[in-house]
Amino acid sequence: MIKARFGKKLPGFELNIDIALTDGILAVVGPSGAGKTTLLQCIAGLQKPTWGELHIGNRLIYSSAQKINLPTRERRIGYVFQDYALFPHMTVEKNVTYGAPKGNNQRNKTLTASGVLAMLKIEHLKDRYPGQISGGEKQRVALARALMTAPELLLLDESLSALDQDTRSALQQELRKLQGQWQIPFILVTHDPQEAEILGDQIIRITKGKQEIVKRLGNSFSVANSFC
Amino acid sequence: MQFDFIPIILSLKVAAVAIVLVVCFCVPVAGFMAKHEFWGKDLVESALTLPLVLPPSVVGFTLLYLFGKNGPLGKFLEYYFHYQVVFSLSGAVIAAAVVSFPLMYQSLKASIESVDVNLERAARTLGAGEFKIFFTITLPLSWNGFIAGLVLAFARSLGEFGATLMIAGNIPGRTQTMPLAIYFANEAGEAQKASGLVIIMTVFSFLVIYGLNRWRKKKKLNLNGGDIL
C-alpha cells in the first residue's frame, strides 16, 4: 500500500501530489517536464519533497511535520530507471543479485535469483554483460533486479518507451502478469496514453505539477478521449 | 668498474611505499571531494593540488620546516617515537608521496565524477549503503582514472629530485635515489656512471608506463566484451 500527499517546489511551478494505491497499477501520464520523474524520485527518496507525508505499507517514510525522511536504501522500493541503469561492469546475474536481501526473509522461497531469472525468461543471459543484451532484455534484467529486493512498491520510469512495438506489447503483458503474481502496487510513468490505458488500474495525469484523476478504480472512463 | 645498484633499489623502494601511501590517502579523499559540496571546498581543492605547481624546492623547504628538529611534526615524532624523518629514507618517501599525490588525486576524482549518478541511485534503491556503493560501483567504474593516476604518480615518485634532496639529503647507500645519484655522478665528472643510470632510469620508466598502459587496454577490452564506456 502506498499513500502519498506531498508538494515539491520545482523551477516555475509546484508539483502537488495526492495518491493512494493498495494494489494494482497506477499509471502516471503527462507531457515532458511536468514532474512525473520527480514524483517517482520523491517517493524513492532520491529527492526530498518540500512538504507532506508518504506512507508505504504501515511505515511512515517521509513526513515534513515530524521531520522523518527515511533514506532510499531503507524504503524497500523497487525502481526501474528510464535508461535501466544496469551496472555495466557486472554480469546479468551479479546485477540481479546485487540487492538481494541476506538472511531470512518471508519471501525467500520465491526469491532465488534463478527463480526470478526464470520468471522473466532471462536465465540464458545470466553470464552476459549489459552491453551484450538487447533493450528488451535489459528491461527484464532491470525488473528482475528490482524484484529481487522484495520491494513493497515498484516504480517504473518510462521504462518501456525506448522499445519497439512488439517487445513493448510483450512486456506490457508481462508487467500485468507480474503485478498479479507479486501483489504489490506498481507506479508506472509513461508518456503514452495508450499504454496507460492498457496497464493502469488507475490513471492520473500531471500537467505543470497539477494532478488530475483520469481513471479511478473500476471506472472505465477513456483516457484517449481525455487527451483529445 | 663495479656498478652500484643501490640507488636503483632505493628508488624503487621509495616509489613503491610512496604509491601505497598515495593510494591510501587518495581513494577516500577523491571519493569524498567528488561527491560532497561544502563551504571552502575550492580552498581545500587548491591546497590539495598545490604540490603539483609549486617548485620542488618550495615543497622541500616546507617539509623540512614541518619535519625538521624544531618543526611541529618533527618534534612530535622525535618526542613520542624517537624517530627522525630528515636525512632518512622515510623523508624521501614523504617527499615523493607529497609531489605525486595531486596527479593521482586529479585523475581519480575526474573519473569518479564521470560515473553515471543514476547507477549510484539504482544501487541506493537496491538497499546499498554509501560504502558499498563506493567500492562496488563508483570505484570499479573509475578504473581507468585510477590506473592512469597510478602510472603518473609512480613515475613522478621515481623521478622526484628537488624535495628529496632537501629533506632526505644525498647519503650514498641510504637516501641517494637514482635521480640524486645521476646528478652527483655528473657533478663529480663520472660521466660513465651517470649515463649508465640514465639509461636504466629511462628504460625502466618506459617499461613501467608501457606495461601499465597495455594492462589497462587489455582490461578495457575485456570489459568491452560487455561494450562498456
Image (spheres, coloured by chain):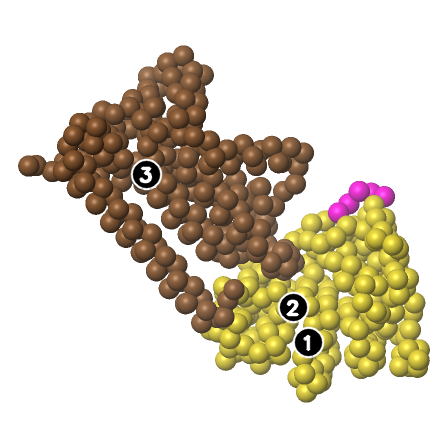
Please give the residue where the numbered disc 3 appears in the rendered image.
B159
Label 1, label 3: how many angstroms apart (C-alpha)?
52 Å
Residue B48 percent location from the top left of the image: 52, 35
- Chain identifier, yellow in the render: A
Which SS class for mark 2? loop
Give the left or right position of residue B41, taking residue B72 as reference.
right
Residue B118 percent location from the top left of the image: 64, 59
Q: Is residue A81 above or below residue B155?
A: below
Please give the residue where the numbered disc 2 appears in the rendered image.
A83
Residue B53 percent location from the top left of the image: 48, 35
Q: Is residue A46 magenta?
A: no
Instruction: Evaluate whether label 1 is on the same chain as label 2.
Output: yes
The tag on residue A105 is none
- Chain identifier, brown in the render: B
Amino acid type, label 1: Ala
Residue drawn at 91 percent across, 78 percent down:
A227
Please tell me which of labels 1 and 2 falls first in the chain: 2
Give the left or right position of residue B138, taking residue A24 as reference.
left
Foreground disc of the pair 1, 3? 3
Marks 1 and 2 close (CB-CB < 8 Å): yes
Mark 1 Cα within 10 Å, few/some/many (few <14, many 20+)?
some
Please give the residue where the numbered disc 1 appears in the rendered image.
A162
Q: Chain of mark 1?
A: A
| B107, B33: nearer the viewer | B107
User: Count the marks: how many?
Assistant: 3
Q: Is residue B208 above or below residue B184?
A: below
Amino acid type, label 2: Asp
Q: Is residue B8 above or below residue A108?
A: above
Magenta segment: A65-69
Residue drawn at 37 percent across, 64 percent down:
B218
Q: Chain of mark 3?
A: B
